[in-house]
Image (spheres, rainbow, N blue to C red):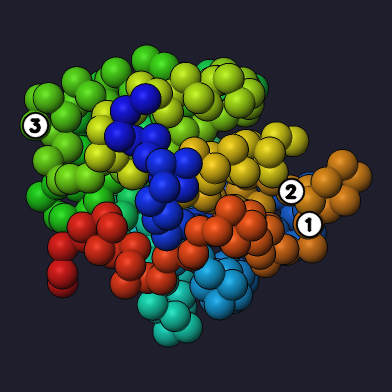
Amino acid sequence: MSAACSGPAGGHPVSVVITVAPTGPIASKADNPALPTQPEQIAEAVHEAYLAGASVAHIHLRDARDRPTADPGIARRTMDLIAERCPILIQLSTGVGLGVPFAEREALVELRPWMATLNPCTMTFGAGEFRNPPADVARLARRMAELGVKPELEIYDTGHLEECLRMRDAGLLPGEPLQFSLVLGVKGGMAATADNLLTMVRRLPAGCVWQVIAVGRANLELTAVGLALGGNARAGLEDALYLRKGELSPGNLPLVRRAAGLAAALDRSVASVEETAALLRLPSR
Ligand code: KMH
Ligand code: ZN
């Protein structure tokens, strides 16, 4: 295995970065009434998650009718409401939502969040299409580097990792360490199996930082496997609407607490905001 797999099994316990993903682009309040969609609701959910150990907040925005949006005013307001409550590191999603044009999505990085997602490839995404044309992705990567916004690279399939490594080799991803999300369970991407996760972890470049995003039913199991392998954890209603079969999660907090509990059971401490910023080598601002 590469150094990417070092962690508790290698005898060097490392703190776990917990990212809360409270909203996402797909689910609605009809799916789970506890889904936070408006800026105040999102800020409240993020604050609770921060108090439970989350040091990063992965943020999707919704308009007044709860539709995914890249409206910079809504983004600014949400970021401000979060910052008023806690110093959690804000990561804006540039995935935003399947129907939102790339030009609107990429403009979100102009708000200079600490981090933003970078989705390297176009793919089928459930019943829809997630469009990430190569020239647009390269332009967004360049702009993020100029602004000092750290990319989180979203890997839904094996080829997405190769594309990121090509971008790195082309100088489009200058900051170390590279930060990956291994996304399992999206229809159109890798199935949510431990075998797929291990395959991807083996292929990661040495020295990178990574987390598991396990969408749907396998959320608990694959989050646990990722933590046991030395990865970080993401938790929230974006990825799992249910705590277990038939039991909707009454909010983001139980999911964040569950991830923190898994880390504790594996004897891994939860990273503070300061530790996370150091681990990711975020530039001081
Ligand atoms: N919704 C997740 C499957 C993004 O926001 O850019 C992937 C995600 C990507 O979180
Ligand atoms: Zn997202």
**Residue shown at 42% from the left, 65% from the top:** 271
Q: Which residue is mark 3?
A: 171
Note whether 65 is above or below 77 in the view shown.
above
Residue at 38% from the left image edge and 77% from the top image edge: 87
Q: Earlier in the sequence, mark 1 or mark 3?
A: 3
| Pointer 2 residue | 241
Farthest residue toward the bottom? Answer: 84
> Quick one: quadrant of the N terminus?
top left
Residue 185 horizontal/vertical position (percent): 62, 28
Residue 129: percent from the left, percent from the top? 51, 22
Residue 5's disc number: none
Where, by quadrant of the figure, is residue 187 drawn? top right
The numbered mark, 2 or 1, whose residue comes first in the sequence reads: 2
Circle 2 SS class: loop
Residue type at the position of mark 2:
Leu
From this viewpoint, which residue is outermost toward the front?
Answer: 11
Tell me: 233 left or right of 250: left
C-alpha span from label 1 to label 3? 42 Å
